[in-house]
Image (cartoon, grey):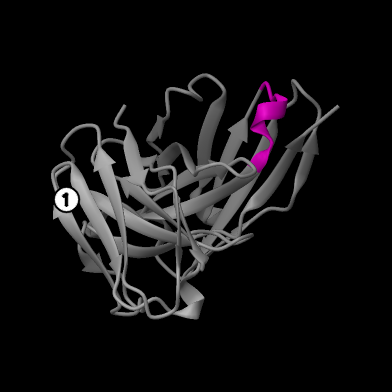
């Protein structure tokens, strides 16, 4: 199985901050990497697919990069609606999620 | 609009089985696979398996092999996930999600979730 490891597990940030979350795969997954946002009590929401493609309707302050084993999700200017937990997911072989990164208000 | 609507909450005894449904609407049902993902309280998302809604082919996580069965009813545009031999560790929120093969196999539409509680 492909293991996905995110860092950090949590972070504290303020509105307007630039936020970066990293995700590492245990083997190369090319660009088969997706990012989701989840708020408490809600289903996850797709933000980024294929490592860097923005899902329709998602604000442009979200961006993704990387290929192979190392990937990054960046929020260029954190907004109040962005406090949530973020998950990476590989779709190269079956599916596996990272452990999540909780973005909290500083 | 495209949506997935899941069946309601379930409470089961240890050793029992549960069957959760996921009704699709707003798109051609047989075009996309459907995944099942669960999330235990305070835990990460966990992929359980998927079913190709067109031909009925399935793939399951090794963790659930032997306990999970995914089926579909094309006339009802509904997918089902049955999990047997339930134990307390199966208490979780269960989600269905649509696979978007044109978008790197991402999950672009999610159901609202079904709570399954396993308790004696």
Residue identified by numbered label 1: A31
Residue B108 visible in the snapshot = no
Residue B119, position as x, y percentages in the image: 81, 30
Please tell me which residue is depicted at 16% across the width and 54% down the height of the picture.
Answer: A66
Residue B89 lies in the magenta stretch: yes
Q: Secondary structure at mark 1?
A: loop
Q: Is residue B7 visible?
A: yes
User: Relative to the observer, which residue lies in front, B98 or B45?
Assistant: B45
Q: Is residue B83 left or right of residue A18?
A: right
Against B24, residue A9 (above or below) is: above
Q: Position of residue B4 (x, y in %)?
A: 54, 61
The region drawn magenta spans B85-92
Q: Residue furthest right?
A: B120
Depth check: B78 or A62 in front?
Answer: A62
The spot of residue B87 in percent (x, y) is 70, 24
Q: Quadrant of the N terminus of chain A?
A: top left
Q: Quick check: B91 left or right of B33? A: right
Up-down: is A54 above or below B73? Answer: below
Q: Considering depth in this image, is B99 or A66 the residue closer to the camera?
A: A66
What is the quadrant of residue A47 in the picture? bottom left
Q: Quadrant of residue A52?
A: bottom left
Q: Is residue A63 left or right of residue B120?
A: left
Q: Magenta stretch: residue B116 in it?
A: no
Tell me which chain the residue with mark 1 is part of. A
Instruction: Identify the residue at the far front of this view.
Output: A106
Residue at left offset 39%, top offset 76%: A78
In the image, B92 versus B81, the foreground residue is B92
Identify whether B47 is placed above or below B17: below
Q: Position of residue A55 (x, y in %)?
A: 31, 70
Mark 1 Cα-neighbour bin, 10 Å: few <14, some 14–19, many ≥20: many
């Amino acid at each position: 199985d492909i293991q996905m490891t995110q860092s950090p597990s949590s972070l504290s940030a303020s509105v307007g901050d630039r936020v970066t979350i990293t995700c590492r795969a245990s083997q190369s997954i090319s660009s088969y990497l997706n990012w989701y946002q989840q708020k408490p009590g809600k289903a996850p929401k797709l933000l980024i697919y294929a490592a860097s493609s923005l899902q329709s309707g998602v604000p442009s302050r979200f961006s993704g990069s990387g290929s192979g084993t190392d990937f990054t999700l960046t929020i260029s200017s954190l907004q109040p609606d962005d406090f949530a937990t973020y998950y990476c997911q590989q779709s190269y072989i079956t599916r596996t999620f990272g452990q999540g990164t909780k973005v909290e208000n500083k | 609009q495209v949506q997935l609507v899941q069946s309601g909450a379930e409470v089961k005894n240890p050793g029992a089985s549960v069957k959760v449904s996921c009704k699709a609407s707003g798109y051609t049902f047989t075009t996309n696979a459907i995944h099942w993902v669960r999330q235990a309280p305070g835990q990460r998302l966990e992929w359980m398996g998927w079913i190709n809604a067109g031909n009925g082919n399935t793939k399951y996580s090794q963790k659930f092999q032997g306990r999970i069965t995914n089926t579909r009813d094309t006339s009802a545009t509904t997918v089902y996930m049955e999990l047997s031999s339930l134990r307390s560790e199966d208490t979780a929120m269960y989600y269905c999600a649509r696979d978007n093969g044109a978008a790197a196999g991402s999950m672009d539409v999610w159901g609202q979730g079904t709570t399954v509680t396993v308790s004696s």
